[in-house]
Image (cartoon, grey):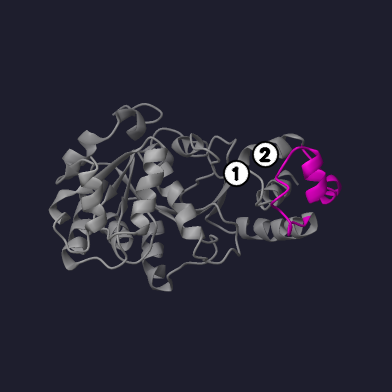
């Protein structure tokens, strides 16, 4: 019953995570939750008079029932903000996701408390860029991702076409882990052309992660929202190739707000498709040209948020 209520609280989309935690701490039962309409929440000081007009506690509870059905499948996990399995770096953010829905290989138990050697205790770096990269951009993304993966770094990206896909492919080529943050529910995959890649990622020990519950379709506004999780999971964000107004630059902006490092890939700075990357370099973002240079630029405290693992 607790997980059902947690999923129902998560579906009150007009509440901040801090407000959801207050509500969750009250330990409401099913009958009590059904009485928590918008007006009741406002009387409790939760929510805003300007938001939540379409919220229905019954609808939230019904949809939470469907969430539990999805979570009953093999390889499906729920990571709560207050739990030991939640990524430590992500917990540092303003308004971090109340719940994370994850898919992994059945052999990987993401619901266990985070410990040395587990996926969310390894150093992680985000690699992002345009959906329409140059041929050189694709080659560099695959090459650098593999170089980072063999150094024990988990690659984080968004599983979009272009640079994101190439970054995940590089890790898969080394049979190593990467994390894809989705801009929709965990029960579907967009674009569908990346279904095979996602399957290979899971087989390599990686995971798909989303703050959106099952059934949430891909919507344009969700992709910029998820970018804060891409940067939030990572010690730093590397922009390989990005034009002006690229979504990769939104990820870089989130990273700076979160106190993460933002870097650019020097070999691609002259690319005609990299005006956004050049602008970042002109504003002071370090330009690196090897995996070792990239790691040297990153904060040790962010690469190893729980301390370095013993060899």
Q: Position of residue 293 (x, y in %)?
A: 17, 39
Taking the magenta stretch, the answer to whether it contains residue 28 is yes
Residue picked out by circle 2: 19
135 or 39: which is nearer to us?
39
Image point (27%, 35%), residue name: 298
Q: Position of residue 44 (x, y in %)?
A: 79, 38
Left or right of 3, for residue 271: left
Mark 2 closeness class: few <14, some 14–19, many ≥20 residues within 10 Å? some
Q: Quadrant of the C terminus?
A: top left
In this rendering, is residue 129 above or below 287?
below
Residue most extreme to the bottom:
193
In this rendering, is residue 189 above or below 15?
below
**Disc 2 on helix, strand or loop?**
helix
**Disc 1 on helix, strand or loop?**
loop
- Between the residue at mark 1 and the residue at mark 2, the CA separation in whole angstroms equals 10 Å
Taking the magenta stretch, the answer to whether it contains residue 30 is yes
Q: Which residues are magenta?
A: 27-56
User: Which is more N-terminal, label 2 or label 1?
Assistant: 2
Mark 1 closeness class: few <14, some 14–19, many ≥20 residues within 10 Å? many
Residue picked out by circle 1: 98
54 or 24: which is nearer to us?
54
Image point (82%, 45%), residue name: 40
Q: Main secondary structure of the magenta part?
A: loop
In this rendering, is residue 181 above or below 17?
below
């Amino acid at each position: 019953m607790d997980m059902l209520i947690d999923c129902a609280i998560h579906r009150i989309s007009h509440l901040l995570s801090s407000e959801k935690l207050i509500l969750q701490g009250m330990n409401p039962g099913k009958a009590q939750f059904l009485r928590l309409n918008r007006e009741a929440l406002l009387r409790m000081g939760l929510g805003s008079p300007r938001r939540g007009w379409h919220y229905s506690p019954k609808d939230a509870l019904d949809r939470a029932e469907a969430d539990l059905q999805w979570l009953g499948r093999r390889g499906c996990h729920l990571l709560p903000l207050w739990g030991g399995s939640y990524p430590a770096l992500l917990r540092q953010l303003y308004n971090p996701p109340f719940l994370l829905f994850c898919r992994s290989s059945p052999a990987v138990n993401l619901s266990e408390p985070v410990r040395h050697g587990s996926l969310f205790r390894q150093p992680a770096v985000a690699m992002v860029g345009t959906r329409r990269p140059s041929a050189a951009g694709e080659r560099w993304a695959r090459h650098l991702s593999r170089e980072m993966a063999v150094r024990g770094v988990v690659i984080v990206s968004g599983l979009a076409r272009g640079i994101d896909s190439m970054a995940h492919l590089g890790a898969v080529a080394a049979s190593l882990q990467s994390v894809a943050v989705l801009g929709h529910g965990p029960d579907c995959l967009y674009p569908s052309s990346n279904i095979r890649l996602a399957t290979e990622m899971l087989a390599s020990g990686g995971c798909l992660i989303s703050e959106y519950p099952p059934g949430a379709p891909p919507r344009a506004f969700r992709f910029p929202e998820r970018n804060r999780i891409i940067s939030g999971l990572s010690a730093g964000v590397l922009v390989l190739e990005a034009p002006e107004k690229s979504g990769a630059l939104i990820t870089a902006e989130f990273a700076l707000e979160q106190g993460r490092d933002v870097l650019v890939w020097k070999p691609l700075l002259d690319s005609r498709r990299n005006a956004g990357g050049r602008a970042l370099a002109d504003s002071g973002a370090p330009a690196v040209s090897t995996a070792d240079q990239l790691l040297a630029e990153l904060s040790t405290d962010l690469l190893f948020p729980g301390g370095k693992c013993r060899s």
